[in-house]
Amino acid sequence: MRYSVISLGCHKNLVDSEYLCEQIITGGGILEQDPDNADIVVVNTCSFLTSAVEESIDSLLEFISRGKQVICAGCMISRYGRDLLDELPEVALFIGPGRYAELIDAITSGQLYLSPKFDSVVSRSFCTTGASAFVKVSEGCSNHCNYCLIPSIRGELTSKPIQTVIEECRVLADGGVREIILVAQDLGSYGADTADAESLPRLLEQVALIEGISWIRLMYVHPASLTEDLVKAMRDIDKICPYIDLPIQHCSETVLKAMGRRGGSRAVKRAIDLLNSTLEDIWIRTTVMVGHPGEDETAFAEIETLISQGHFAHLGVFCFSPEQGTRSYSMKNRPNKTRAQSRRNRIMALQQDISKKRLHKLIGEEVQVLVEGIHPETDFLFIGRTAFQAPDVDGVTIITEGTVERGRLHQANITDANDYDLIGTVL
Ligand code: SF4
């Protein structure tokens, strides 16, 4: 049979999709990039927000209407469970997270529904061939923020053993991967569910020893989980990119309290100070949520002021989305949608200038660039990323001159910059 896997949602889901691909290949199936060529389409869904649920359902229905046998995997099953059997009777199989090893057996035996299993931590498949790879170090999250469904969708924090992560990184390095991007719902909590709570810095030390790995990138560290040891490891281990994704969500104590964010505003301030005082040149990416219940004009002014101080090189701003099943859903004092949208626009406009200035400061500098391939719009240019540009979410570096090799690090001279991207020539 010919299969195609559609991955929706976050980078952590992408890792799961690769695991699904591995199951298909080892089970004797043929993997097709183009779903049009497949008999069976597996849609690995996201249900974190209502908009993600809508996208997942649209995708399932689209492939059903195109006459494909459709399998629904992922977070939709964790959120809606067996109700989906009635809602989407055309779907051939619903397979929850943690059950992907059973995919082929379930198809062969004609099963309809496999409920999620939260205590299993799957190993990743090795379908990727690029120079960068995401490595998921844990499943689930135990922070229980009031607006977030992740703990109920993906369960409590379950960390992979260090040796499993190292082995995964080693295989990826042997396959040509040069950049390991460690991801988790809260990377800083890695190991907190075991007797070895301080294991992230040790994990980093061991990943850095793997031959072939040049860059290690850290994504999604809750401010309250950012320890001094972790920041020291970032300072002392050369291979760790001067970059961190630190989702603060807000800085007003009132709002953070309503959000149920561990550590509140003190944790946010402490994390920013710790990074800036320990690391010479750190590029912080963050996420801010506007419009959560409790965000009045005073609270919004606080986050606007923090953003205007220029601590963040990259920023994503989202409007609060009330999700049924969360504590935030029924909270009062919620700014209306229009106000939330206008606050989002204000913060985005503020940040655009800050990001642009930060990039423009690099003009004339020499930086390392990991070359990813030919520019999607023209064969005459290459694109790559610097250590302070993460894949998919930040800008890229456009290479206009020089001889480059895909998947290799090159020294580049930055000649120009626009709002989000750098332009350079390889030396
Ligand atoms: S830390 Fe992130 S994943 Fe965990 S509950 Fe909070 S928002 Fe959700």
Image (cartoon, grey):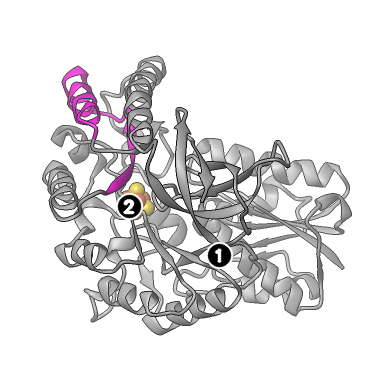
Number of numbered discs visible in the structure rendering: 2
Whether residue 55 is visible to the viewer of this picture, yes or no, is: yes
Residue 383 image point, x, y percent: 59, 46
Q: Which residue: 28% across, 56% down? A: 143
Residue type highlighted by circle 2: Ile
Q: Which residue: 54% across, 70% down? A: 98
Residue 93 image point, x, y percent: 72, 61
Outermost residue on the front side: it is 427
Residue type highlighted by circle 1: Pro
Q: Nearer the viewer, residue 76 or 401?
A: 401
Per the rendered image, the range of residues in magenta is 282-310
From the viewer's perspective, is residue 328 above or below residue 101? above
Label 2 residue SS: strand
Q: Residue 265 is drawn in which quadrant?
A: top left
| Mark number displayed over residue 244 | 2
Specify whether 86 is left or right of 314: right
Q: Which quadrant, please, contains the N terminus?
A: bottom right
Query: Badge 1 local density, few (<14 within 10 Å), some, or many (20+)?
Result: many
Q: Residue 287 is drawn in which quadrant?
A: top left
**Residue with the mark numbered 1:** 97
**Mark 2 C-beta to ligand 1 under 8 Å:** no
Q: Is residue 326 magenta?
A: no
Q: Residue 317 is drawn in which quadrant?
A: top left
Q: For the residues marked 1 and 2, what is the alpha-carbon distance in whole angstroms?
A: 27 Å
Specify whether 44 is left or right of 190: right
Residue 418 image point, x, y percent: 47, 28
Q: Nearer the viewer, residue 222 or 158?
A: 222
From the viewer's perspective, is residue 168 above or below residue 238? below
Q: Which residue: 37% across, 31% down? A: 360
Q: Is residue 294 magenta?
A: yes
Whether residue 78 is visible to the viewer of this picture, yes or no, is: no
From the viewer's perspective, is residue 145 above or below residue 178? above
